[in-house]
Image (spheres, grey):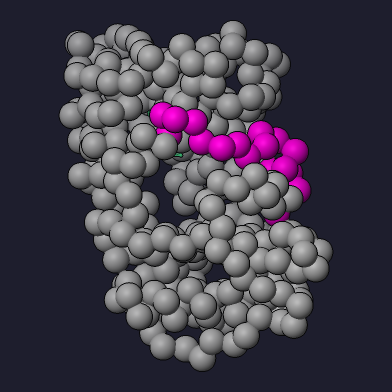
Amino acid sequence: MSSTEELTIRDLRPRDVRPLLEISEEAFSIERQMFGGNPPGLARQIRLMALLYPLQRRLPRPTAIALIGLVGGAPVGAVVVDPMKPSWYVNTMMVARDHRQRGYARALMEALQARATRSGARWLLLHVRDNNAPAHKLYESLGFHEFERRHEMLLANPGPVNSSPLPEGYVLVPRKRYDRRALAVRDASREPEAARLEPPSRHPGIVMRALGAFSPPADSDYQCIICGGGWVGLWDYVQSSATASVRLTVQLVPEHRGQGLERPLLERAIVRAGQSGADRLTISVGSTNRTLLAACDEVGFNTRFVRIGMARRLGQDG
Ligand SMILES: CC(C)(COP(=O)(O)OP(=O)(O)OC[C@H]1O[C@@H](n2cnc3c(N)ncnc32)[C@H](O)[C@@H]1OP(=O)(O)O)[C@@H](O)C(=O)NCCC(=O)NCCS
């Protein structure tokens, strides 16, 4: 490490919130451009998270571990994870621009790895933009390897389209967002390597639900796709309250891909977004899900960037 000033690392405290928001504002500008940001909603969520932090860490299923790096008592970086079992998922890794390339991110990641290993976690997982060379190099140098690629696709100005019907035998039915059958479909629809590494989907705990309630979506619609009486897919449409950006999720179990479902499901979202005045639709598609990628292409989505899923086995060197 070539730091000029010493970095100290400790857990999140409420007074860190304002400097962390300032760091994230600059660090994630590309993601904000793509997905549309919600700075007031994010600020409310982080404030609540900081207040609940000591309490939630004592729960049997904590929601977050947030390690803060400080120089001269001021926060200069952070790493935030969802400590699931057996894999911890890194949600946020950032260092303030003026403090980069001094080994601070490496020090934060190493502290995190030590904490995760002590807690019995077996893997650290994360996603990184393929054009984010500093972060990609950082993770490779720490022994992370690639396990999946996801296309982050965007369709601007969704306009009127002809909406084709679902193929015969399939129906869409409204569902509760976290219905246990939906969690099972989500798991069965994962990329093969992601399915091996990522923990099974779970109902979000009370803390996550409280955080979500602090910035509810402007519009949302959760549907399941049913065939022969069974759940075979999910269609989630969520418009953030602060922007005109809609996040679409289309998940189909592998046996029901390429049956003519993909295009009508996308068109249904485009029609709805057009009617509601949304300025863009975004979707994340795994690189092995060829039929959904092709359908997105046909209806006018473009890949804005690829997110690389990376994993590091804990308790082993490199
Ligand atoms: C990625 C980021 C966290 C790195 O923070 P940092 O404190 O500058 O990183 P470090 O000084 O600890 O560097 C550790 C390693 O990362 C890599 N790295 C960091 N910055 C780099 C750069 N500009 N170019 C190439 N490699 C770089 C190197 O491998 C480096 O090891 P080395 O110094 O031994 O060569 C920082 O650039 C950042 O906050 N970026 C914006 C937010 C972001 O993209 N977060 C990651 C989301 S997945």
Question: Foreground residue, 16 or 61?
Answer: 61
Residue 121 to residue 37: above or below: above
Q: Residue 85 location in percent, x, y?
A: 64, 24
Q: Residue 187 location in percent, x, y?
A: 69, 46
Q: Quadrant of the C terminus?
A: top right
Ligand 1 picture quarter: top left
Question: Foreground residue, 221 or 130?
Answer: 221
Residue 289 to residue 191: above or below: below
Residue pictured at 73% horizontal, 50% vertical: 188
| Range of residues picked out in magenta | 189-208
Please state the total of marks drawn on the protein image.
0
Q: Is residue 160 left or right of residue 267?
A: left
Asked whether residue 156 is in view, the answer is no
The quarter holding residue 18 reads: top left
Is residue 191 covered in magenta? yes
Residue 146 to residue 246: above or below: above
The quarter holding residue 165 reads: bottom right
Q: Quadrant of the N terminus?
A: top left
Residue pictured at 72% horizontal, 59% vertical: 231
The quarter holding residue 315 reads: top right
